[in-house]
Amino acid sequence: MITPYLYVPLFAWFIAQLIKTLIEIIKGDADVRYLYASGGMPSAHSAVVCALAGYAFYHQGLNSPLFGVTAIIAGIVMYDSFGVRRSAGEQANVLNKLIAEMGRSGNLRKPDEYRQLREILGHQPLEVIVGAILGGLVATLFSLNQLSPIIKWLTALPSKLEINIIFGAGAALIIVSLGIFAVYKKKIKKDRELKKINTYFQISNISSGLSLLMAGLLANESILPYGQRWLAVTIMAIWLICMLIAFWRLLNIQKVSRFNASDQNASKHAWLKKARKK
């Protein structure tokens, strides 16, 4: 018998590659290579490792060493997908354009000796998130008989302590969101990209905070089914995804600003060098 820890991730990989191929066909780019190529929507790497970690969670539990190992591996692979591998893909894109331009201008000898570098290596954050969700769904599909305790916990009313935590989390999201805006108000208004991210950040936090306050109120009044744990858990999961996207967008802005700053310093240094010669 083949272990499910092998065929469940492989099934997730197959589904991810199939979805990726169908998306490209709809776009008008029918190519059989999408069935095994990396990159694109959704991330097959994320689907594989999250299916593995999800299956370990369902069948071994949170306190098992196997789940711990698979969860850490999943985190490393997903970080690498939109980190190192994505940066390598962007560098390949720039190098391909540079070699092509230098070849056309005659500044590069024997440009044909340089083979085309693969550009689709990594993923956008959304592609990684969708791949992770797909992997979790596949693990759930193969673990339906293990869901009873989880469903029972999610559909139960939270305790008084949990209700207070829900109220506190909702209030904290709103207060922290408004506090950050008040502290960085001047800086945000000067930067258009930062202003866009702040709007997204404020909407995500305030709407999540208000939703948690409502969930806490429903739980406190024991209103079924919305007073059960599943509502607060769902709100927090959506908020976490939104924060990951906001954090990644902020990192991209910082990268661009650092690049522009270094480019300006290089230009300034070149101008001063020319001025000294004169």
Image (tube, helix red, strand yellow):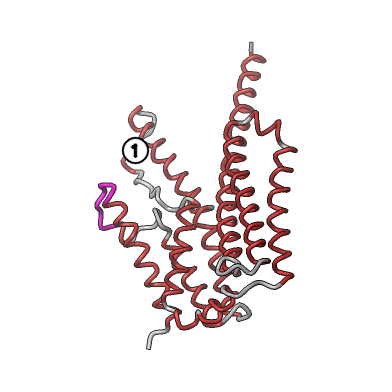
Displayed quadrant of residue 223:
bottom right
Magenta region, mostly helix, strand or loop? Answer: loop
* Residue drawn where x is 33% and y is 43% of the image: 113
On the picture, is 16 further left or further right than 270? left
Magenta region: 26-33
Q: Position of residue 58 (x, y in %)?
A: 52, 79
On the picture, is 213 further left or further right than 30? right
Total marks drawn?
Answer: 1
For the C terminus, give its image quadrant.
top right
On the picture, is 100 further left or further right than 69? left
Q: Nearer the viewer, residue 92 or 217?
A: 217
Q: Nearer the viewer, residue 177 or 272?
A: 177
Vertical position of residue 268 compared to residue 226: above or below: above
Q: Residue 28: say if magenta.
A: yes
* Residue drawn where x is 42% and y is 78% of the image: 142
Vertical position of residue 217 compared to residue 189: above or below: below
* Residue drawn where x is 57% and y is 65% of the image: 226
Q: Nearer the viewer, residue 245 or 52?
A: 245
Q: Position of residue 125 (x, y in %)?
A: 50, 52
Residue 57: in sight, yes or no? no
Find disc 1 in the rendering and name its residue.
111
